[in-house]
């Protein structure tokens, strides 16, 4: 759009002068063609359809014109640019992408003008001295912004060509109206503005033939701006200018190819994102219906073909691995001890130096056992607890997590099915206050728990989280316990169970409340460990892709899902962001903004559904748009760093997250 605004700084000699402006000195001057002379100009080309027809009309009447070319269009139609010059016509600068110079910053003005000049030099072997700012018209329409850009261009040696007679052919008013707009009122010389690009120019071509006939009958000489003004407007480009221009054009063509490739990739990623939303919501709805039917059948509220399984009432061993967990261990152990299901609690102190074990022992709670051992890492602590466990059902919980009274009882009910070897619970963010807490709360509800419903239905659960997971002890023993091969021991263990033929399911009403990182640095460290460990586990269990049965479902469904949506798509995300910024600046900001809003709308709908089935308030979703500008970038940078680290073969050691002592079960 053309710039609008004050013209207070435009000299009267310019605003009331002729259409050819020379601002190269401190005292700007203007000029116009002599009497009975028409300087014919065309803007916005070259166009593969209309420019050749206009050139044919000019050739028919043995006249020449000045073509102010757009650099991007010239790159797409190099032969037309050469034909313009070969036919004896003149070329001027009309910027690289047809930007309004009056509203563009100085760096953009420089890029647009010099970029177009380099294209002209590369394609014609000449340079142009004439400039027409896009959206310009007559002198009295100059604004302060456009005048400033004219002065800046003049400092580089350019003469600015405005117009004294505008055909307004861009409005497509009809051939007769175009001819009327260009009817000369007297003998004064004129600079005539027409267009050979930017849209349908059939009316321009038809009107041009008649106008040239009339001008010639009236005794007007039709020529180029340079010839009309008696100036040399083009000169041979130097070797350096031609080399620079050729490299610039090659860069534009490469960027065009990249933009096309990225555009198709964006379409693909958009389709994948949309399909993922449909897939996840569809499977989550199916999981919810199955859960409701099972619950109602168990309560005898409705007739159902689903067999009613007896309630699981056997006691459970709860293992709490702890390393310097003094901030939250008391809340965690107390919450488990208040369970309405019989539990044995084993707290394994993995060489803590902050008195974690002492705090647990001071509670003197019945059924709570403390094991002290040298520091060996979380898998070592879990295995120590497993060896000491008295019962066949085992629940593993992090030391930064609190349970509700019915969490254990609800968590173990799927074990009524003898095929089930492990159960994932529903992890909730306890410290969800503040925007960072809200973002993680959204991620847990949408990105984790919604996905787990899909994995459950598809029988390819890749992770039972360390915050809340239940296991059959014999199943754990069959896979050799908890491995320390990866940093994501929970993912590694879950995948091993799936490959061993066990079903792993999700119990959404078994809730655990965990502390989430309270700073971006802590969040980065946590997610880096998670992501790197997940990549390790995926590589370790890659053989599942070729297996059959439960292992094959994990390999082809679970690992495929993780690879596409949690590795490849985040790796492509920075390209999406860079392209979006490029599009906002150089392409169509309205279309780019609209696409972003569509993407956001899909996310909001998916999030709203996830919150609804999880019985969560929709209030935190106001932070979702903001999440796209900080949190999302942090997450994909974590993936990038993890992938680079994995390819570099760097070994990371396990480290614990900072605790804040904010653990409690939020009030309903």
Image (cartoon, rainbow, N blue to C red):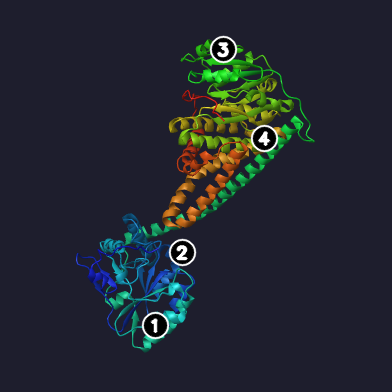
Q: Which residue is mark 2?
A: 76
First in sequence: mark 1 vs mark 3:
1
Image: 298 above or below 109: above
Residue at which label 1 appears = 62
Q: Position of residue 128 (x, y in %)?
A: 32, 67
The residue tagged 3 is 370
| Residue ID at (37%, 89%) | 217
Q: Which of the image's four quarters has the N terminus? A: bottom left
- Label 4, on which residue? 456
Residue 328 visible (yes or no): yes
- Give whichever of 270, 124 is nearer the camera: 270
Distance between mark 2 and mark 4 Cα atoms: 52 Å
Q: Residues within 10 Å of mark 2 (few under 14, many from 20)?
A: some
Left-right relation of 137 to 524: left
- Disc 1 from disc 3: Cα separation: 101 Å
Query: Which residue is pictured at 54% across the width and 11% down the height?
Result: 361
Q: Residue at x 50, y 36 (%)?
A: 438
Q: Residue furthest bottom?
A: 217
Looking at the image, do the residues carrying marks 1 and 2 touch, with CB atoms under 8 Å apart? Answer: no
Residue 242 in view: no
Mark closer to the observer (2, 3): 3
For discs 2 and 4, the disc positioned in front in the rendered view: 4
Element assignment for label 1: loop
Q: Earlier in the sequence, mark 2 or mark 3?
A: 2
Few, some or many residues within 10 Å of mark 1 (<14, 14–19, 20+) = few
Q: Secondary structure at mark 2?
A: helix
| Mark 1 vs 4, N-terminal side | 1
Mark-to-mark CA distance, 1 and 4: 78 Å
Ranked by sequence position, the earlier of labels 2 and 4 is 2
Q: CA distance from mark 2 to mark 3?
A: 75 Å
Q: Position of residue 599 (x, y in %)?
A: 54, 49
Residue 600 on image: x %, y %: 52, 47
């Amino acid at each position: 759009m053309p710039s609008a605004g004050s013209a207070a700084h435009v000299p009267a000699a310019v605003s009331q002068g002729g259409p050819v402006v020379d601002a190269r000195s401190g005292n700007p001057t203007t000029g116009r063609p002599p009497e009975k002379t028409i300087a014919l100009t065309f803007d916005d080309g070259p166009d593969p359809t209309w420019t050749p027809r206009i050139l044919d009309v000019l050739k028919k009447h043995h006249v020449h014109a000045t073509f102010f070319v757009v650099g991007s269009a010239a790159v797409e139609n190099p032969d037309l640019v050469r034909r313009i010059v070969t036919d004896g016509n003149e070329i001027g600068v009309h910027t690289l992408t047809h930007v309004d110079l009056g509203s563009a910053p100085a760096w953009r003005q420089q890029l647009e003008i010099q970029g177009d000049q380099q294209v002209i030099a590369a394609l014609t072997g000449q340079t142009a001295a004439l400039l027409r700012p896009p959206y310009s018209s007559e002198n009295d329409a100059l604004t302060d912004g456009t005048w400033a850009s004219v002065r800046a261009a003049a400092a580089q040696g350019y003469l600015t060509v405005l117009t004294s007679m505008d055909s307004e052919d861009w409005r497509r008013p009809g051939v007769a109206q175009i001819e009327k707009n260009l009817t000369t009122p007297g003998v004064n010389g004129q600079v005539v503005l027409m267009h050979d690009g930017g849209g349908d120019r059939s009316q321009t071509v038809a009107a041009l033939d008649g106008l040239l006939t009339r001008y010639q009958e009236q005794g007007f000489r039709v020529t180029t701006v340079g010839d009309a003004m008696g100036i040399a407007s083009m000169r041979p480009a130097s070797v350096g200018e031609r080399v620079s221009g050729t490299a610039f054009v090659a860069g534009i063509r490469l960027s065009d190819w990249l933009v096309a490739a990225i555009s198709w990739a964006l379409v693909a990623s958009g389709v994948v994102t949309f399909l993922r939303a449909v897939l996840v919501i569809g499977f989550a709805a199916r999981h919810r219906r199955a859960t409701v039917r099972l619950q109602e059948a168990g309560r005898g509220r409705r007739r159902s073909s689903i067999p009613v399984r007896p309630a699981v009432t056997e006691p459970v061993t709860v293992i709490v691995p702890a390393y310097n967990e003094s901030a939250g261990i008391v809340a965690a152990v107390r919450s488990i001890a208040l369970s309405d299901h019989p539990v044995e609690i084993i707290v394994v102190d993995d060489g803590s130096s902050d008195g974690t074990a002492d705090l647990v022992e001071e509670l003197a709670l019945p059924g709570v056992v403390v094991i002290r051992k040298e520091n060996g890492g979380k898998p070592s602590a879990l295995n120590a607890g497993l060896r000491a466990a008295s019962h066949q059902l085992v629940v593993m919980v992090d030391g930064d997590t609190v349970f509700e009274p019915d969490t254990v009882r609800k968590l173990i009910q799927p074990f009524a099915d003898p095929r089930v070897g492990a159960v994932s619970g529903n992890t909730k963010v306890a410290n969800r206050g503040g925007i960072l807490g809200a973002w993680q709360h959204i991620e847990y509800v949408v990105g984790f728990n919604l996905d787990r419903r899909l994995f459950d239905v598809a029988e390819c659960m890749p992770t039972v989280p360390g915050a809340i997971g239940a296991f059959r002890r014999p199943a754990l023993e069959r896979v050799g316990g908890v491995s320390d091969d990866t940093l994501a021991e929970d993912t590694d263990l879950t995948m091993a169970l799936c490959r061993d033929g066990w079903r792993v399911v999700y119990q959404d009403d078994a809730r655990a409340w965990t502390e989430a990182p309270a700073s971006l640095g802590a969040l980065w460290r946590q997610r880096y460990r998670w992501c790197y460990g997940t990549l390790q586990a995926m590589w370790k269990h890659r053989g599942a892709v070729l297996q059959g049965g439960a292992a094959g479902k994990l390999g082809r469904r679970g690992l495929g899902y993780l690879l596409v949506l949690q590795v490849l798509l985040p790796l492509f995300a920075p390209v999406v962001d860079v392209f979006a910024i490029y599009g906002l600046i150089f392409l169509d900001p309205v279309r780019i903004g609209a696409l972003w809003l569509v993407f956001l709308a899909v996310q909001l709908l998916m999030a709203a559904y996830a919150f609804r089935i999880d019985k969560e308030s929709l209030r935190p979703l106001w932070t979702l748009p903001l999440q796209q500008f900080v949190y999302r970038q942090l997450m994909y940078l974590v993936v990038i760093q993890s992938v680079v680290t994995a390819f570099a073969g760097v070994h990371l050691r396990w480290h614990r997250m900072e605790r804040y002592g904010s653990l409690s079960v939020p009030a309903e």
